[in-house]
Amino acid sequence: MPHPLFEKHRATLERALTAIAERGYWSPYPESASPKVYGEGTADAGKAAFDALLNRSFPLEQPASMGQGGAEKSPYGFALGITYPKSDTDALFAAITKAREEWRRAEPEAWVGVCLETLSRINKESFLIANAVMHTTGQAFLMAFQAGGPHAQDRGLEAVAYAWDEMRRVPASAQWEKPQGKNEPLKMEKRFRIVPRGVALVIGCCTFPTWNGYPGFFASLATGNAVVVKPHPGAILPLAITVKIARDVLAEAGFDPNVVTLVAHEAGDNTAQTLALRPEVKIVDYTGSTANGRWLEEHARQAQVYTEKAGVNQIVIDSTADFKGLVRNVAFSLSLYTGQMCTAPQNIYVPKGGIDTPEGHLTFDQIAAGLADAVNKLLGDPSRAVEILGAVQNDGVLRRLEAARSLGALVLDTHAVEHPTFPKATIRTPLIVKLSATDRATYLNEWFGPIAFVIATDSTDQSLEIARDAIAGHGALTLSARRRHHARNRRRRGHRCCPLDQPHRRRVRQPVGGFFRFPWHGRESGGECSADGCSVRCQPVSCRSASNACVNRGPGIRDPGAGAEERRNEIRKHQIRNVEGYRANHAESTRSAQQLYVGNACGGARCACGGENRRGAAGLAADGSGQRILRRPGSLRPGCCARRNGSRSRRIDRKQLSAAGAGATRVALACCMRSEWRCGGRRR
């Protein structure tokens, strides 16, 4: 029988499934903060609830408490004074291990139902969360409401929908029958069960704690994993509220609330590293600096690691049909949330000979001056400026601003803006610096914050070459070019092109991917959600019964009766004959590029390279003595792991398997066909 919470939210889930199939816009969570949408008095109630949390202990009961901690400060000029429980790590994980046993035995309907109820309750607290996001990240209130509330909730629902869509592909049972000529047919009854990976760790960031945190949080919870949330020390409150709501839902649904826990800590310690290396942690979702993200990728080998790291966003200007529209759009992108966004542009490449426009030819200096004028016009009214800029989240942004002022000629200097309501708020306008193409050591590093470089290049071709070289290791590429350059760039380099001179509605987040408010992150996104990202958080286990025997069983399933070994050997002989026949056919084939795809509906197959998705060559066990696949760090077998991020379908080059020997071929194919092999792919 489906779980009551699943039935309660079935209509929402079905509509979300339609949205991910059609890739169209849909959201059950209104982004308007109007009282006509959320009801009269809800905004005031949310503000009152936020004020009630200040200067006291946050109401969260967790096991193994060792006192309180927390030192959050609002970028608008006051200390929050909220403390959070600190737990002994070993005792906390002991409680988590106990809680997850019952949780993992529940059916997927229960996991998904709890997630949907949690999202529904979070949406009702959107005004409370908006105030929490505003006073921990520095976002202006409207942006904090939208990005930290409904937009983040959309991303959480997106994760749940993808998770359910993958899990429902696995049948509860199936009948398998193969004719054997004059002999009795082979018959098996297959029973499948989704098995979670273990404990998932969500490492939050200080600028978008819910927007970046919800995809990983709900993807792991919806696939039956326990979730440990470690917020950034400067932005604990939004995720603490989320954890409390989730724990309340779990308890009311009859589960141990320690399935979801919070680990708050002081700045400067190694809590994230300690948690990420624990053997219980099998999934890590991280958003933050490149250095910390790379450390997790290299050291948290026991876990599936997803990282969204820092990047350098770029704009190439070649020509425009509407120069005023172009500079208005760029000015808004530079100013929104003081440039503290993963989408904020940093490098603006302009030919030093200028560009052509309908009004005539514009020189490089005229283009740079046009950008500065557009920023000044946008932020000319202080009351309007503070709602666009928000506040500076941390002192690191201020230090970078001061350092960047000496890097080159100033096109536009930064200055402070006074907030009419919060006079102690730290608010700064964008800084624009002029550089040349030879200053790569400067502009190819990330300068997080309201810092932009207008870079003089020899030509648009050089601009594109610099962008191409930088994009592999940095951020997104945004282009403003003639149609011929759009087509050429897509054809030659596969980059996504976006004209900047077209009018658009100014919104905090604009729909880009076509589903909900699809993420804008680059190729190494911990926040971005997809079917692949959800499917590898659990695995299907099959129990195949033949003559009252369990064969090809998954982990933890015992043989139900005598005669299992004999029947298993008989079926294995058929499998090996099929594999040998397959190899013989392949040897006669001239299509060396053909590949064999193996996998199952929940990403449970493991490819011959071990799923490590790295460079080099991986070894295969060639003696046929056991179902073992050798691998070494930093290796990728050519033809393997074509799709990243835990793809449901892994590919193995037939020619390579044949060259490895008959034993290796049998072992590799047999292993990939077995349901108990889980994907070991690491997000790179």
Image (cartoon, helix red, strand yellow):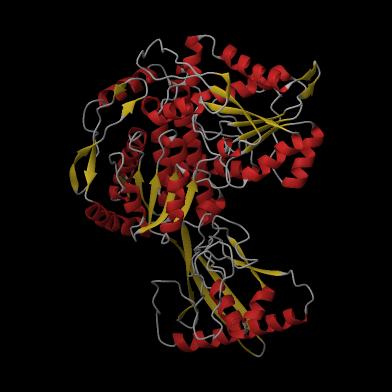
Using the rendered view, name the quadrant where residue 346 is placed: top right
x then y, percent, for residue 24: 64, 37
Pick the residue in front: 68 or 363.
363
* Nearest to the observer: residue 172 or residue 112: 112
Counting the numbered discs, the total is 0
233 vs 582, left or right, is: left
Task: Kindly tell me whether residue 112 is visible in this rendering.
Answer: no
- Above or below, 600 relative to 456: below
Left-right relation of 59 to 516: left
- Asked where in the image residue 218 lies, by quadrant, the reply is top left
Rendering coords of residue 536 (x, y %): 50, 57
**From the viewer's perspective, is residue 51 above or below residue 540?**
above
Q: Position of residue 416 (x, y in %)?
A: 44, 15
**Relative vertical location of residue 302 with respect to residue 348 in this rendering, above or below:** below
611 or 63, nearer to the observer? 611
Where residue 576 appears, as percent x and y from the top left, is: 60, 84
213 or 154, nearer to the observer: 213
Judge whether residue 18 can be spotted in this image. yes
Q: Quadrant of the N terminus?
A: bottom left
User: Residue, x 76% and y 38% (percent of image)?
Assistant: 461
Say which residue appears at 39% left-offset and 54% top-offset.
Answer: 225
Residue 463 appears left or right of 149: right
Identity of the residue drawn at 62% across and 83% down: 661
